[in-house]
Image (spheres, coloured by chain):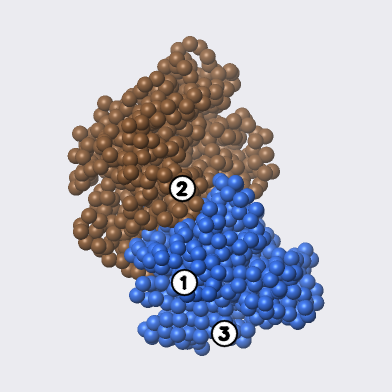
Chain colours: A brown, B blue
Amino acid sequence: MTLLETTNPAAAGGRGEPWISFDTDPGRWRHWKLAIDGPVATLALDTAEDGGLHPGYALKLNSYDLGVDIELHDAVQRLRFEHPEVRAVILTSAKDGVFCAGANIKMLAQASHPLKVNFCKLTNETRLAIEDASASSGQIYLAAVNGAASGGGYEIALATEHILLVDDGSSAVSLPEVPLLGVLPGTGGLTRLTDKRKVRPDRADFLSTVAEGVRGRRALEWGLVDELAPRSRLAEAARARAEALAAGSDRPTGAAGVPLPPLERELGADRIAYPNLTVELDRALGVATFTVLGPAAGGPEAGAPGGPAPERPGEGPEALGAGWWPLAVARELDDAILLLRFNEPEIGTWVLRSQGDPEAVAALDRILLDQADDWLVREVTLYLKRTLKRLELSSRSLVALVEPGSCFAGSLLELVLAADRAFMLEGELEGVDQPPATLRLDGMNLGPLPCPNGLTRLQRRFLGHPEALDAVAARLDEPLEAAEAEALGLVTFVYDEIDFEDEVRLAIEERASLSPDALTGMESNLRCGGPETMETKILGRLTAWQNWVFQRPNAAGEDGALRRFGSGQRPRFDRKRV
Amino acid sequence: MTLLETTNPAAAGGRGEPWISFDTDPGRWRHWKLAIDGPVATLALDTAEDGGLHPGYALKLNSYDLGVDIELHDAVQRLRFEHPEVRAVILTSAKDGVFCAGANIKMLAQASHPLKVNFCKLTNETRLAIEDASASSGQIYLAAVNGAASGGGYEIALATEHILLVDDGSSAVSLPEVPLLGVLPGTGGLTRLTDKRKVRPDRADFLSTVAEGVRGRRALEWGLVDELAPRSRLAEAARARAEALAAGSDRPTGAAGVPLPPLERELGADRIAYPNLTVELDRALGVATFTVLGPAAGGPEAGAPGGPAPERPGEGPEALGAGWWPLAVARELDDAILLLRFNEPEIGTWVLRSQGDPEAVAALDRILLDQADDWLVREVTLYLKRTLKRLELSSRSLVALVEPGSCFAGSLLELVLAADRAFMLEGELEGVDQPPATLRLDGMNLGPLPCPNGLTRLQRRFLGHPEALDAVAARLDEPLEAAEAEALGLVTFVYDEIDFEDEVRLAIEERASLSPDALTGMESNLRCGGPETMETKILGRLTAWQNWVFQRPNAAGEDGALRRFGSGQRPRFDRKRV
């Protein structure tokens, strides 16, 4: 049973192509083993050699492919929600003498350029989610490197806060991508060496050019790892370190976890429907329209409009669990984004809409804000944060439409601010019994959901214009109609009923006519105004270089290093430096 | 007479290929007109249509190619050194109704990938040199946009501090790269919109997708330009603005400029020799060895070792002019870097050596430090800064060798700190009458020569290790032998006479065997640890994406937008988003 076969092939436009889903759970994992002992979880990699997502390669030496990483992504997510008691996570290997050999090279060599890029993006997001758990969830990751950690294997360890390396005279950490494969350590490796671990650049250069890597005392002296232990003491040392890290965590004791059941999802040929989100595909135009359905107005989870957050037993976030609207919407959006990224590459524009009561969204935002110290509420906010980042990191044009009946308030308004352009309809629609569209800001727009560069979307939008930011911040919790939203700079263009549909259609058609690659490059720059962080450096500088290298004959050509690895033939390089 | 023909074709390994030089002067310019009126210079673009550097395209509508940019690079440089009286520079066009149409598209379409990348890099460096003049030299650039400014044309204007646009109902600023050519506004355009001009990202997105651009009041409101003027008042408004900007400048009055005569340079088949620098090429290994010759020990320009800076009339920087050693070395290094970048792409490793008296270098550094307020001394330091940046921005592996007889002190020591790796020989060499090699730090290592990210090379090297930085800063002005240099973290590896040559040869041979593209990507990441600035974002994120796009069939393929532009045929795109 592979992830490919668990899904409905009809969804790929009836083309019958294999289709990648992200549906899994611990009962179905083939590559990871999770054990929980009090506050410490151990997540051990033990790849099934015959468990590759695609045919044509064996997952030897704990090498990974997309399927392995989808399970890791699932594990990291479930540890946060289902295991409030876990305060430290030991990443290790269940195989003797090898920690992880990194991304499977035969898999990479046979993968198309889009699949390589998408695979690397997801792996990077999962590594960043691990760091987010350590930094923000009180669930701190460490690595017990019990054997060779090569390439992506060392890069997983780099995503943890503490690396313990077995000191056995042979186990090394290494980044053999440049010397063996002609590609980069692109899963954050180069950036984390210099910016996270502060390894001296000449030493990082040395490490990145020697296939055999660095081991033992030199690895420790150079800051490539944090601690050494003999094989006989490794498990004990990891446990001791995990308990020390766990001691500083603020996760609750005695809280019940929130199970994450399979998503309710209907797949049609041109449609994906969840309880709180529908995605409609227009294949001719290359457009997917996301419509988020707001929380049921006046329902128990919404809270009384304008009133205090609901605290009735059985109706708060803990009782509703995965059914609590903010969590349900985050999961559904996240799933839809990944499904479209991997399976619908020709759908180049994503249109973002919403339907519902803005007051109901605002009431839930009040819970997110007022109960921000609650572990579960915090997890939900962090999940929304990661989902919005994933949206912006998708190589698709994002267009938001704000129409009567929409509910772009607070956390949902972030979708409008994430869009490359936002169009708002001014006034009422003839024959439709809806008040004019409004936007509504609240505290969720002022901090809890930052962009990868650490700024809020409003700060990024009004970079260098503090007066514009102040003007917006003075209008929290008010319905803002189109003219005001435009004057405040929250939307790009405002049209009345007569022009709206035509203008939007024209804008989308024009965009759909442009070069998909140029749009991807353009959006990757314009979405990242302002400061850079380690995260943006990994997703921007490092990833862009890796994508360039992936296109080069010296890596991906017939005689390139990636294709020739393991063939017994040396690669043939065009020696010209570009 | 083109730049191609002014040089000795023997230098390209006797292969007889056309060879690009950077030798020009105002008497030979074909595309720019410089007029100086008191403190205000006007630099007007007036391309000679038949003056393209390569055959196959005409430089219509003030479109530019490498030759036009080499002249601009020359003009910016000469304005700094030869015209101390100039405090503001108006960039404009001498053609009616068109400011600049950007990079010539036929030229781009026919250029090889390496030439495209090198061309874009040089244009970016020149735009950054313009910003450096405005920020640091008191020579402030403004743009009088007297007609359409498209693509690279608008990007030149973006590199100035004030953009004045003619308000004639038709002249627009535009970035048509994405809609017309399927590539990015990669000469800083996207980054300067968001990070320098703080244009709202959705507006930047709009501008970057409409070929016709934005004009008049909207351009002003959106912050795309700073000022509008009717055609009849444009020159007057530009002059007034230039005088206002000039008023804040600290450039001297009454100082004589320093002429920049043609460089003395001997070109051989495998050798370039200047008075203070020789470059030897080993084509089999793909290595160029740069040997900087230090200032004549005890000569008048060196100052007495350990003594005060020389102040004897006729022997200071102003009297020696272009012959003053720090300026001469900066010019020679700069020229050699550019020549090798463009003409010797298969020389993938640059080895950096020096010969001379470290005391003599240190004595000149004292002048650079003690007289830092002098306009000429400041210019020399700024030139050294730009040259070191250009070195690190070159897609070549940099290896420094510190041997007996070398003079890596202060500003020259920056070459060692710029290298990807540095090897130092410990002790004396048998049969050679030289004391052991030393390194020597001084104030030039602590601020005046920052990396593009704003840190000193020492700060970048010891990122997150303030104690290491303090230890180094405590050892200024002392000769540091190999063991100390290694303990302080200034060099990568230290070997004695028995091992040095073999270890160095092995390291260079191993590096030469790796994929040139992977090395380029790796070095572009490892050289940029720490914070990012607008400059590093342009040279990293934006450039890496542009290089990726340049490789994609949607741009560069037979049916791609770049190749089909102007053919009357629409490009054919693979619609898959990556």
Image point (47%, 59%), residue name: B494
Q: Nearer the viewer, mark 2 or mark 1?
A: 1
The residue to which callout 2 is attached is: A222
Q: Pointer 2 and pointer 3: residues touching (CB < 8 Å)?
A: no
Chain bearing mark 2 = A
Chain bearing mark 3 = B
Chain bearing mark 1 = B
Image point (46%, 47%), residue name: A222
Q: For the residue marked with disc 3, what is the amino acid?
A: Glu
**Residue B237 seen in render:** no
Q: Is residue B5 left or right of residue B555?
A: right
Q: Are marks 2 and 1 on the same chain?
A: no
Residue B331 position within the rendered picture, expressed as x and y whole percent measured from the top left: 59, 76
Residue B119 position within the rendered picture, expressed as x and y whole percent measured from the top left: 48, 71
Image point (27%, 63%), residue name: A571
Image point (75%, 82%), residue name: B314
